[in-house]
Amino acid sequence: MYAKIQLKKLDKKKKTDPKEKPVYSEVKTGKTTVLSTHIYSGHSEDDGKAKAVLTIYPTSSQIFSGESVTLRCNIQRGEVTDWEYTWRKDVVDTINRNHEYELTEVKISDKGGYRCLGKHIDQKKHSEWSDAVRLTVTALPETTLTVNPDPAYNGETVTLTCSVGSDSGWSFTWYKDNTKKVVTLSGRHTTTGATFTISRAAESDQGLYWCQGEIQSRSISSIIRDPVTITVKALPKATLTITPNHAYNGETVTMTCSVGSGSGWRYTWYKDNTKKVVTLASRLTTTGATFTISRAAESDQGLYWCQGEIQSRSLSSIISDPVTITVKERPVAVLTLQPNWPQIFSGETVTLRCDIQGGEEIEYVFYNSGKSVYMNTEPEYRISTAKNGLYTCKGLQKTNGLKHSQTSNAIQLTVLDKPQALLSVSPQWLNPGDSITLSCGVKESSTGWRFFWYRTVPYTAGLLSLSDRSYSVEPLSGNGTSEDSYTLIPAGPSHTGGYVCRAGRGDPVYDTLYSEPQFLWSGEPKPSVSLKIRPNITQHFTSTSLSLSCEEKRNSTGWRLKRYREKAVESECGSNWGSIAGSTCTIRSTYTGDSGVYWCESGSGEYSNAVNITVDVGPLILESPAYPITERESMTLSCTYRYQETNPNPKVYFYKDGVLIRNETTGEMTIPAVSKSDEGFYKCKSNEGESPESWVTVRGVTPGPSTSVLVGVVVGLVVAGVLLAILLVLLCRYKNAGGSCCNRIFWPPQPQRTKLDPQQDQGSTQGQAPDAGYTRLQHGGANIYDTMTPSDSNDNDAGAATAGRSDVMYAQIQLKELDKKKKKMTSDPKENPVYSEVKTGKTTATGPVDVTYAEVDLKQKAKAKKKKETSTPPEADSVYSQLKPVTAPGT
């Protein structure tokens, strides 16, 4: 492409009117010459200008690319015919001598607004510009092919429609399988305008189809688009499905009929045979492809079919295979709780089990207050942390999720707070030899528990401890016991201390809280430390002073005074009660809250004796010993009036275990020698009021550990003495056969008989002086007798009272050789006595037992005269023994 541009200089004096003096550039492109710019200067001399008229051929409103377009410029009212034409497209001009301007194979870029102008060659006149004419160029259209129906079934009519836009004048050509094979028309294949029709479609009509539009007068052909596929298939068969397969009374049954993937089908329903159409009713309804039976009953059982129809196409599917509907009673679900405890506690694990007869291929659903909480194919729901609620269950069919069973019975779970074990100790005060029973229970429940027993020890980090860390615990039994009691046999000082228990049950084991500590106390003084109370009584008035101290007897450290009241252990003195000074705790002004059991406890877990103190606001208290009383000791009980000065000598009644035993005007009652039967609860009454009860413990007198050994020594020595006497008798008979004194003394031999007064032991047991016991030996005409004098039992030495009774004795026996020169003994016992002297002593304050020893002197004197002994009464010749009390040596 090249451009030739001529620029003409304007006259400076003249105005630049484009109509008078045009300046233009000439651009030549191939065959087409476009005038790009015309600038006219000056005015036309001829005011009567001719009008140019522009027309476009073809005259169609839509010109397609590739067509030829001709523009014609006609000059009207012109006087001359020799014209030159200027063609303007938008702002580009082209000059041509021909009044026609042709565009061959028009393009989209040729569209725009066109005008023309005529100029006389000789006269140099020009016409007016024509009106603008708009040229629109459109791309060749693509054909659009539609097929109906799709898919088609054998025997149906299939219609194909070809479209190439809105313009008319198109004719169409049809192709099959490829663009070169034109469809051969026949009796079943016809065309009408843009429509191609296949009558009585068959499988041979299947394939790919195209179409193309043509305008023969303009030699235009549309663009061929993607083909469409015609599918011709056999009539479909209806398929009937039913949900649920096995229905239950009252359930909704839904049947669904389908005929392939095509739309427009309507359905007819049949029951029991293909000719009986189902009669619809309020319980039997249809919606589209669905047939619904509400509230199914046994009368709804039977065989069902369905068939699809397309009425607009006069088409019916093949009827479906039948399905069978069965209606029966729904099975019952039974919900059980395992373990079936009446109470469930927070944190426990329980299992709910749902049992349904015939429960195959179902899912078990568990509900809490109507809301689904668990679903599984297994019938058990394990709840690791039980929750409150009303639980039910039922079964659902696994395949479709429909209800399989009735809803089960309901189980109400009420989850209680974690329970605390309750421990009781019986008896709580130790007596030597008693069995102590620890009993454990759970207040809220008594089912399924195993019990675990513990002894309290001072708090130690790393050991199991109570929640308040007041104590750590050591197990008494490793695996626990199924029994709710545990026996300590025998009870003794080593069992003094605190005890706790707890219970556990289930799998995994669920434990209760530890019980509150319960204590097993002894009033007996301990070798390591003793609790002393001042004043030494168990009952005290309010607003008085009370002093308690832990008095150590050996090197022990870490002792602290503690008290137990209202089933709670309080920390040691000085924390929130009492004031501590050294080893003494002082309660300066007592009140009723100070009532309780007091004891001393070491850092290693040792316990002192315990004292049960009662502080009373009433007018009377009973002053009784704070420590156990030993049998045979004297005990005085005093009934003290708070305002003694106003009534110094009230008449007082004393009660034991609720029974009146004595009344006194002095306000005191004395038991001179207590026994075990005097143990019990005591109180007093007067016209001023009544005192609280206090327990008095009576400690029995038990033999010391060395008693049996010493008694054995004594018995052995006595037996040795008897045997020695027998040897002497035999020796005497051997030397003085026929008439010796020995014969007179020991002949004839008689069986030995011993008589022991049974009241001796009883009397000592009761703390009373025993009667003198004796042993009488009878041997023919001679008597050997012992006289026993008991020790003084009325000595109330404090040390003896503390040590208690003992039956330990030992004997020292001296055997003196008889005079060999004297062969005979006089029958006078004053001259020839054989005696033993037994001296008995009693326990000192430092000695643990009563000690008795005996010194026996056996003396024999021969008579001077050798004549035969005269006959004497049995009492004339005797061997006697006299026992005299002596004082035992100190330890």
Image (spheres, rainbow, N blue to C red):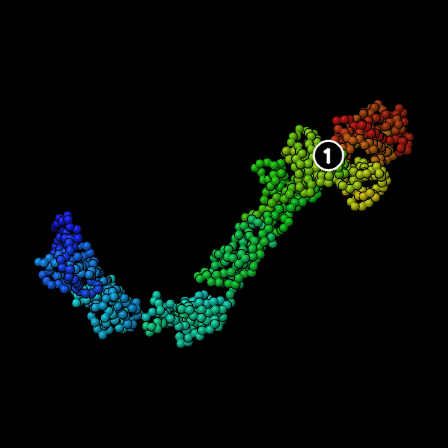
Number of callouts: 1
Q: Nearer the viewer, residue 107 or 883?
A: 107
Q: Residue furthest top?
A: 821
Measuring from the top left, give residue 329's x and y in whole percent. 51, 67
Give residue 769's quadrant in the image: top right
Measuring from the top left, give residue 234's x and y in whole percent. 31, 70
Q: Secondary structure at mark 1?
A: loop
Measuring from the top left, give residue 475's x and y in whole percent. 60, 41
Q: Residue furthest front?
A: 13
Left or right: where 136 falls relative to 702: left
Q: Height in image: 272 above or below 643?
A: below
Q: Nearer the viewer, residue 119 or 838?
A: 119
For image coordinates 53% across by 50% down, the residue present is 384
Measuring from the top left, give residue 835's x and y in whole percent. 84, 29
For image coordinates 81% across by 28% down, the residue present is 886
The residue to which callout 1 is attached is: 588
Q: Height in image: 388 above or below 182?
A: above
- The answer to whether one can see residue 717 in this image is no
Q: Residues within 10 Å of mark 1 (few under 14, many from 20)?
A: few
Give residue 590's quadrant in the image: top right
Amino acid carrying mark 1 in the image: Arg
Give residue 668's quadrant in the image: top right
Left or right: where 352 falls relative to 269: right
- The answer to whether one can see residue 299 in this image is yes
